[in-house]
């Protein structure tokens, strides 16, 4: 596996969700993230993480500049859910961490003020590409009944604000309604509480 910083312009990555752009990216000698071993993924993340944090921090969404100081919920990034085959790493703020890290399959009620931030990254033609930072914020009870009091935000891979549909995000997350709409990291990479 080769991980060498390179300088690129914008890269198209999962156009259905966003265009990913990087100031610094990493070259990868695999066809896709599905071809990577756990060690490959860890090395790829080590190469990408500073560029992701820098890009997301350009956005004025508070979570985009703060999430790297929160609790990381997995031992390494992994592919999960409907995020276009990207590798994902989820962080939980202090309000969310204790309840989230239980990874309970039912009876979950996240406290208001819980915020989860999910980094996403992958590759485009063998070059690392920063995907969106997805953010879920638990609102006060009754503040957004159509989304079970969750607000969904996203930051583009270049730090811009990504226009998203609350209904689109919630329509996917509602499949985990017993978990207060939370999709957890895959079991193999979950940290213990």
Image (cartoon, grey):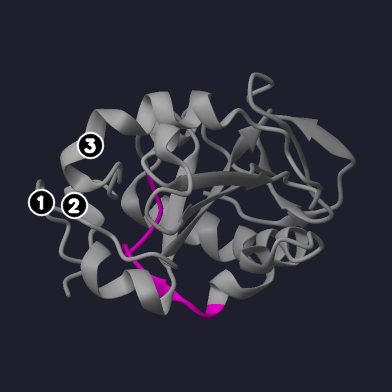
Left or right of 190, for residue 116: right
Real-space CA distance between mark 3 and mark 2, rounded to the nearest whole angstrom: 22 Å
Compared to residue 136, the image places residue 172 above or below, namely above
> Could you tell which of marks 3 and 1 lies nearer the N-terminus?
1
- 155 left or right, relative to 100: right
Q: Residue at x 24, y 46 (%)?
A: 186
- Of helix, strand and loop, which one carries label 3? helix
Badge 2: residue crowd in 10 Å (few <14, some 14–19, many ≥20): few
- Considering the image in quadrants, where does the C terminus appear? bottom left
State whether residue 60 appears in this view: yes
Q: Is residue 84 visible?
A: no
Instruction: Single out the mark in the foreground, 1 or 2.
Output: 1
In the displayed structure image, the side of residue 128 where residue 140 appears, left or right: left
Of residues 67 and 136, which is closer to you in this image? 136
Relative to the observer, which residue lies in front, 143 or 82? 143
Q: Residues within 10 Å of mark 1 (few under 14, many from 20)?
A: few
Residue at the (79%, 33%) spot, across then down? 11
Magenta residues, start to end: 69-78
Q: Residues within 10 Å of mark 3 (few under 14, many from 20)?
A: some
In-image side of 165 versus 180 (left or right): right
User: Where's residue 38, x and y in %?
Assistant: 33, 52
Q: Earlier in the sequence, mark 1 or mark 2?
A: 1
Picture coordinates of residue 151, whole percent (x, y): 52, 46
Q: Which residue is mark 1?
A: 107
The residue shown at (64%, 43%) is 132
Label tally: 3
| Residue 50 x, y percent position in the rendering | 67, 68
Number of the label disc, if any, that sits on residue 188:
2
Label located before the other in sequence (3 or 2): 3
């Amino acid at each position: 596996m080769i991980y060498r910083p390179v300088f690129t312009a914008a890269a198209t990555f999962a156009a259905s969700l966003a265009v990913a752009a990087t100031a610094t990216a990493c070259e990868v000698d695999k066809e896709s993230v599905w071809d990577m071993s756990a060690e490959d993924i860890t090395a790829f993340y080590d190469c990408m993480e500073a560029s992701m944090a820098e890009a997301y921090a350009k956005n004025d969404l508070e979570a985009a500049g703060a999430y790297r100081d929160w609790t990381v919920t997995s031992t390494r990034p992994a592919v999960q859910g409907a995020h276009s085959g990207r590798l994902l790493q989820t962080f939980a703020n202090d309000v969310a961490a204790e309840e989230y890290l239980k990874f309970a399959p039912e009876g979950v009620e996240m406290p208001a003020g819980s915020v989860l931030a999910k980094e996403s990254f992958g590759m485009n033609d063998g070059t690392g590409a920063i995907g969106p930072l997805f953010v879920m914020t638990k609102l006060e009870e009754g503040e957004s009944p159509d989304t079970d009091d969750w607000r969904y935000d996203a930051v583009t891979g270049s730090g811009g604000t990504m226009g998203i549909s609350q209904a689109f995000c919630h329509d996917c997350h509602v499949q985990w309604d017993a978990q207060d709409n939370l999709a957890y990291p895959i079991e193999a990479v979950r940290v213990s509480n």
